[in-house]
Image: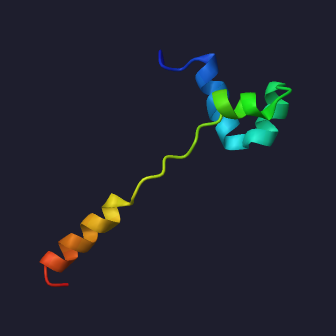
């Protein structure tokens, strides 16, 4: 698994734990460091699958 690095593992664990718990686990004095570098932000975008299913259903007479 060449893609897996120590940092990718740290980011995965920090994301699961959340900022406060990850900060303690990683030993950061400032939670902003943990948040900026280790916790992945959720992607916010429209639910295109639901929209497509609605179009499909209406085209098929449902």
The reply to whether residue 38 is visible in this rendering is no
57 is higher (above) or lower (below) than 34: below
For the point 59% across and 37% down, the residue is 40
Residue 31 image point, x, y percent: 79, 34
> Which quadrant of the figure has residue 34?
top right
Between 13 and 38, the one lying in front of the other is: 38
On screen, residue 45 versus residue 36, left or right, reads: left
The reply to whether residue 7 is visible in this rendering is yes
> Which quadrant of the figure has residue 47?
bottom left
For the point 63% across and 18% down, the residue is 6
21 is higher (above) or lower (below) than 62: above
For the point 25% across and 65% down, the residue is 52
Between 59 and 41, the one lying in front of the other is: 41
Between 7 and 44, the one lying in front of the other is: 44
Residue that extends furthest to the top in the rendered view of this protein: 2
Quadrant for the C terminus, please.
bottom left
Between 2 and 60, the one lying in front of the other is: 60
> Which quadrant of the figure has residue 38?
top right
On screen, residue 11 versus residue 48, left or right, reads: right
23 is higher (above) or lower (below) than 60: above
Number of numbered markers: 0
Residue 13 image point, x, y percent: 68, 34
On screen, residue 22 versus residue 53, left or right, reads: right
59 is higher (above) or lower (below) than 24: below
> Which color mode does the image show?
rainbow
Residue 46 image point, x, y percent: 39, 58
Residue that extends furthest to the bottom in the rendered view of this protein: 62
């Amino acid at each position: 698994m060449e893609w897996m690095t120590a940092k990718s593992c740290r980011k995965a664990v920090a994301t699961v734990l959340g900022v406060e718990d990850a900060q303690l686990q990683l030993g950061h004095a400032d939670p902003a460091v943990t948040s900026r570098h280790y916790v992945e932000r959720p992607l916010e975008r429209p639910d295109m699958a639901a929209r497509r299913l609605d179009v499909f259903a209406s085209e098929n007479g449902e």
